[in-house]
Amino acid sequence: MRLVLALLLLLLPTLPSAQSEEIVLGLSRNEVAITATFDGSDVLIFGAVKRDAPAPDAGPLQVIITLAGPSTPVTVRRKERIAGIWANADAVEIDEAPSFYAVATSAPLNDALSNTEDLRHGISIPRVIRSVGAPETVTDSASFTEALIRIRAGEGLYQVLEGGVDVEEETLFRGQITLPAALTEGDYTARIFITRDGMVVDEYETQIAVFKAGLERFLFELSRNQPLIYGLMSLAIAIAAGWLASAAFRMFQR
Amino acid sequence: MQIYLPIAEVSVNAFLLLGLGGIVGILSGMFGVGGGFLMTPLLFFIGIPPAVAVATEANQIVASSFSGVLAHLKRKTVDLKMGTVLLIGGLCGAALGVVLFNYLKSLGQVDLLVTLCYVVFLGVVGGLMFIESLRALRRSKTPGAVPQRRKHGLVHALPFKMKFRVSGLYISVIPPLLVGLCVGILAAIMGVGGGFIMVPAMIYLLGMPTKVVIGTSLFQIIFVTGFTTLLHATTNYTVDIVLAVLLLVGGVIGAQIGTRIGVKLKAEQLRILLAGMVLLVCGKLALDLLLTPAELYSLGTAGGH
């Protein structure tokens, strides 16, 4: 009994120190409205580190910010030459891949985060993509995941912004993530990690709602809820436009 | 000016779409083709998801065809009777085609099949038309040559004869019904109006005069693509009205200009131009199949599209 107490006493001073640094966060916006003229958007994520005690002597404080769009399954297909023509051959279904993902760090990702912590919290891009089973015919399923990352990175949907977070006096931090114009709706999850020596000290999570607004919202809802009316409306517009153009040209000719 | 498309969920340049619509509209008015076989690949190229591109394109074709048909109606170059017969066949064909398409989709490889369909049909149609119109052009240059008499073959031996006054034909309704049916099936599989098959079929199989063919083709395309638009809107929710409006504003204006250009050209010239364009698209698609692609991998929504 006494031994246990002694152990607890020994642990006590160290326990709070693990929690002695806490994130206090601010967001430039907690919602993004997609309107007809939407052309991408910047999200500024800033905050401070709250301490009960002086900063610990461990390695420098690093901040990692991630922003993830809603995850969906994706099929990745690979073309192969079959009888002289290029056709889709193997396909791998990736169970969960975010539609958008950005990681901004205050130092190179490898310095700011250890591999085990990355595995535990799922921070780097390959760690947020979940691919469980590839069909038996595919032996190199990893190259399919790489292709997914390559294609989405090329479209600006997956971003790694090393050095994209500024940290001042080990207390204040700010980072900016640019959302591309081709954005899907949903709740985007922003996560902020502070690390020392590659170990996560504290973690904070918040949501940014991305939604269509105004005319975009109205048309989207109509197409889903009243598809027949929406379809007839599309046709009516087409016919009217066709007639108008024809009538206008006849006027010109007279 | 960037515009966000609500269904396609991408942001594109509005003027680019207006321009694309205009160019395709001119071609549509000139040749009596819906222009889908040109526009759909172009939309893929600027990053519109294929399902949305195909469905929205159908809606845009309705507008440009309607605009074109009005111009032709004024000139009395639409054979409404023939158009209706073709349309009956066409709608049956489209319904059959959708069933066939879904069956092929369940087997996989539907994308490849569609591309192969394009290459084969565009190649055959374009090639035949090119050779024929070259020959006709040469004939018209040597004065005194007697134009070939129309052949009286199987088409004229069939029962259920009907008089098509505008086309100046007295033939059985079976060949136009069959032409409509076949084009309808192909149109549904390939996701286009089918004008580029319909026009040569009417000229060479039914022996209709070229001037009437274009208006009549446009007339029946309106209904086939209108039907397709409704099907896509209610089953796949892939018609993007904003995209359609941008394309069709350019398209209807283009169609009016195109119709006026078309009237000024000689029938042989018109045909040789259409043949050249068809062969060009065919060549591009064939190259895509044969050359090593820059990116071997492609992304799709799970379950395939």
Image (cartoon, rainbow, N blue to C red):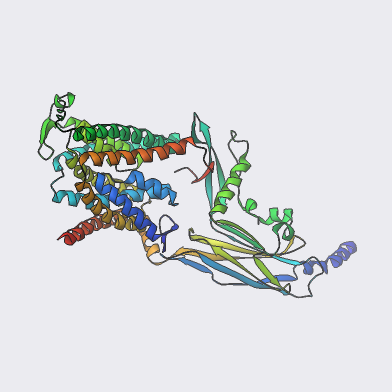
Q: Give coordinates of residue B143: x percent, y percent.
A: 16, 33
Most foreground residue, A36 or B115 = B115
Quadrant location, the C terminus of chain B: top left
In which quadrant of the rendered view does residue B191 lie? top left
Q: Relative to residue B249, is residue A22 depicted above or below? A: below
Residue B85 horizontal side relative to residue A188, left or right: left
Res B243 seen here: no
Q: Relative to residue B240, is residue B199 depicted above or below? A: above
Res A144 seen here: yes
Most foreground residue, B37 or A139 = B37
In which quadrant of the rendered view does residue B244 lie? bottom left
Residue A167 horizontal side relative to residue B136, left or right: right
Quadrant location, the N terminus of chain B: bottom left
Most foreground residue, B280 or B103 = B280
Residue B44 horizontal side relative to residue B209, left or right: right
Tell me which residue sits at (33%, 54%) in the image. Answer: B21
Q: Give coordinates of residue A139: x percent, y percent.
A: 62, 36
Residue B275 horizontal side relative to residue B285, left or right: left
Q: Give coordinates of residue B137: x percent, y percent.
A: 23, 35
Most foreground residue, A232 or B4 = B4
In which quadrant of the rendered view does residue A91 lie? top right
Q: Give coordinates of residue B145: x percent, y percent.
A: 16, 30
For the image, the number of numbered tags is 0
